[in-house]
C-alpha cells in the first residue's frame, strides 16, 4: 500500500469544511491518517462482536425486542465477544496461468435468471439453495449473536412484508420455498441491513474528462464484516424480469434487493451506509428500493424522481451514474433527500456521511484521499489508476468487493474476497447479458 497521507497534506474538496490537522479519532486513539479506518476499528468490525451487540441495541431502541424470552441487552462495552462461526470451505486455488491468448476464468459465478417473479425466485432458490442456506445459518444468525436477538429480528423483519412491492414479495416467497428456508427467515436475510448499524463503503464517479480514453467510470468498494463466511460467496446475478428493465447486481446468494448494480440502459448505482437512528418498518427495505430504481428507471434524473416520491426507510448515501455520464450522489433520509453533483472537471466522491446538511466529519480520510488522488491524476484516471485508487482506500479484510462500472459500455470490472481491491480485477461485459432477448430465438 502506498505511504499514508496525513489529512493536513490533503486539500479539502470544494464545498467541505477544512479538516483540522492531527485531529484525534473518536475512539480516543492517535490521530487518524491515511485512507483507512483506524486499525482497531477495522479489527472490531471484522470480528463483528461489537456489530452483533449493537444489533440488540438497535432492535431495543426501535421497541422491537420480544416481550418474553429475551434477556437484557448488553451494551457493546459489556457484551462478551461472539465466537466467529466456523469457516466456510476454502475456495479452491486458482488454476495455473493460462496462455496469454486465453481468457482467465472468473473467480465468481455469473448467474442469469428471468421470467415472472415466481419463476425468478424458484430458479434462484434451486440453483443457489445450498449456498443460501449456509449464509442464512452461518452469517445472518451469527450477526444477531444469540437466539433472542435473532427472534427479535424476525419480529422486526415481519413488519416489512406488507411494504414490499407485490412482485418482489412473490419472488421472495418463491425463493424461500425453493431454497428450503422459512419465509420469515428469508425476509430477515433480505432486510437485516435496515435493522443493524453499519459503516463502510466508498464510491467515486468520474466523467470522461478524467481519463485519456474519455470513458466515464464509477468506482466502488463494499466494506462489510465477512465473519469468515461471506468473503468467498460473492457473485453476479443477472435478472431479466418480465415487463421491467433487466439488471446485473454484484451480490450474494439469496439477496433479492440490490446494493451495487447496473441495468440494461446503463443506469448504475451503489449505496453507502451512514449514521442513522433506529426506525420501525415504515417503507420497503432500502435494497429493494434500489432494485426498483434499476427495474423502473433509465436515467439519473428518473432515479432521483423515484426516490423523491417513494417512502424511504433508512438513511443512506446512493451514488448514481447513467449511460450519458450524468452523476449524482443522493443523501437519503426518511424525511427528505438531498442531491449533490459535481462539475464536469471534478470527481464526485462519497463515503459514509451526509455532507449537504452540514454533517461532514472533522476527518474522513477516505473521502479526502479519493478527492485528492483523483485531482492529482486527473486526465489519467484509466482503469488501472482507478483500481489502484480503490486499493489505497480499501479497508483491509472488510473490503469484500471492489468494482469499476463503465455505464456507457455496460462493462464491469470486479474483484472479490477479503482485501478485494488488491486481488486483481476481472472484466465482465454486461452488454450481451442485459440485451433484450429476441423473440425469434424462442427464448
Image (cartoon, helix red, strand yellow):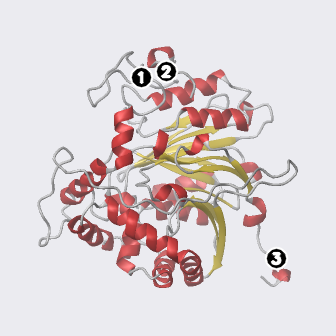
Against 291, residue 154 (above or below) is below
The kind of secondary structure element at disc 3 is loop
How many callouts does the rendering have?
3
- Farthest-out residue, right: 101
* In-front residue for pair 218/90: 90
Query: Where residue 159 is drawn, which disc sits there?
Result: none
Residue closest to the eye, 229 or 202: 229
Name the image quarter holding the N terminus.
top right
| Residue with the mark numbered 1 | 17
Badge 3 crowding class, 10 Å Cα cut-off, few under 14, some 14 to 19, many 20 or more, is few
Badge 1, how many Cα within 10 Å: few under 14, some, many 20+? some
Mark 1–mark 3 distance (CA, rounded to whole Å): 53 Å
Residue underneath mark 2:
12
x then y, percent, for residue 234: 56, 59
* Residue occupying the point 50% across, 14% down: 9
- Decide if residue 191 is on the left or right side of residue 413: left
Marks 3 and 1: in contact by CB < 8 Å? no
Tell which circle, 1 or 3, labels the residue nearer the N-terminal end. 1
Instruction: Find residue 407 and report its horizontal and vertical position in percent.
Output: 70, 50
Residue at 59%, 83% in the rendered image: 119
- Secondary element type, mark 2: loop
* Residue, disc 3: 438
Specify which label sits upstream in the sequence, 2 or 1: 2
- Whether residue 359 appears in this view of the structure is no
Which numbered disc flags the more N-terminal residue, 2 or 3? 2
Contact between marks 2 and 1 (CB within 8 A): the answer is: yes
Q: Residue at x 42, y 34 (%)?
A: 355
Quadrant position of residue 193 = bottom left
The answer, for residue 42, to whether it is visible in the render is: yes
Amino acid at each position: 500500500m502506498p505511504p499514508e497521507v496525513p489529512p493536513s497534506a490533503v486539500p479539502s474538496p470544494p464545498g467541505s469544511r477544512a479538516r483540522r490537522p492531527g485531529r484525534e479519532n473518536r475512539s480516543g486513539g492517535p490521530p487518524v491518517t491515511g485512507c483507512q479506518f483506524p486499525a482497531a476499528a477495522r479489527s472490531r468490525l471484522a470480528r463483528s462482536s461489537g456489530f452483533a451487540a449493537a444489533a440488540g441495541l438497535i432492535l431495543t431502541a426501535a421497541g422491537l425486542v420480544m416481550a418474553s424470552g429475551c434477556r437484557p441487552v448488553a451494551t457493546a462495552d459489556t457484551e462478551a465477544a461472539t465466537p466467529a462461526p466456523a469457516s466456510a470451505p476454502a475456495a479452491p486455488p486458482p488454476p495455473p496461468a493460462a496462455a496469454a491468448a486465453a481468457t482467465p476464468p472468473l473467480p465468481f459465478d455469473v448467474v442469469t435468471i428471468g421470467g415472472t417473479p415466481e419463476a425468478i425466485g424458484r430458479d434462484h432458490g434451486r440453483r443457489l439453495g445450498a449456498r443460501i442456506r449456509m449464509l442464512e445459518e452461518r452469517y445472518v444468525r451469527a450477526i444477531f449473536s444469540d437466539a433472542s436477538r435473532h427472534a427479535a429480528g424476525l419480529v422486526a423483519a415481519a413488519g416489512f412484508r406488507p411494504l414490499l412491492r407485490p412482485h418482489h414479495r412473490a419472488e421472495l416467497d418463491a425463493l424461500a420455498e425453493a431454497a428450503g428456508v422459512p419465509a420469515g427467515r428469508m425476509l430477515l436475510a433480505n432486510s437485516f441491513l435496515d435493522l443493524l448499524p453499519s459503516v463502510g463503503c466508498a464510491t467515486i464517479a468520474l466523467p470522461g474528462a478524467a481519463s485519456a480514453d474519455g470513458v466515464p467510470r464509477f468506482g466502488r468498494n463494499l466494506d462489510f464484516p465477512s465473519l469468515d463466511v461471506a468473503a468467498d460467496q460473492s457473485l453476479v446475478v443477472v435478472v431479466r424480469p418480465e415487463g421491467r428493465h433487466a439488471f446485473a447486481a454484484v451480490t450474494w446468494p439469496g439477496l433479492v434487493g440490490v446494493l451495487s448494480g447496473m441495468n440494461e440502459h446503463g443506469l448504475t448505482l451503489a449505496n453507502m451506509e451512514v449514521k442513522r437512528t433506529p426506525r420501525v418498518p415504515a417503507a420497503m427495505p432500502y435494497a429493494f428500493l434500489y432494485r426498483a430504481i434499476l427495474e423502473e428507471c433509465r436515467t439519473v434524473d428518473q432515479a432521483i424522481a423515484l426516490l423523491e416520491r417513494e417512502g424511504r426507510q433508512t438513511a443512506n448515501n446512493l451514488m448514481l451514474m447513467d449511460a450519458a455520464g450524468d452523476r449524482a450522489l443522493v443523501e437519503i433520509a426518511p424525511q427528505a433527500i438531498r442531491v449533490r453533483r459535481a462539475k464536469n472537471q471534478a470527481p464526485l466522491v462519497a463515503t459514509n456521511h451526509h455532507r449537504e446538511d452540514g454533517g461532514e466529519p472533522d476527518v474522513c480520510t477516505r473521502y479526502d484521499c479519493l478527492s485528492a488522488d483523483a485531482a492529482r491524476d486527473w486526465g489519467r484516471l484509466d482503469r488501472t489508476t482507478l483500481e489502484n485508487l480503490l486499493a489505497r482506500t480499501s479497508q483491509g479484510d472488510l473490503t469484500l468487493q471492489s468494482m469499476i462500472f463503465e455505464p456507457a459500455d455496460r462493462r464491469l470490472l470486479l474483484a472479490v474476497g477479503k482485501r478485494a481491491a488488491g486481488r486483481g480485477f476481472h472484466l465482465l461485459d454486461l452488454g450481451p447479458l442485459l440485451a433484450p432477448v429476441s423473440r425469434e430465438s424462442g427464448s
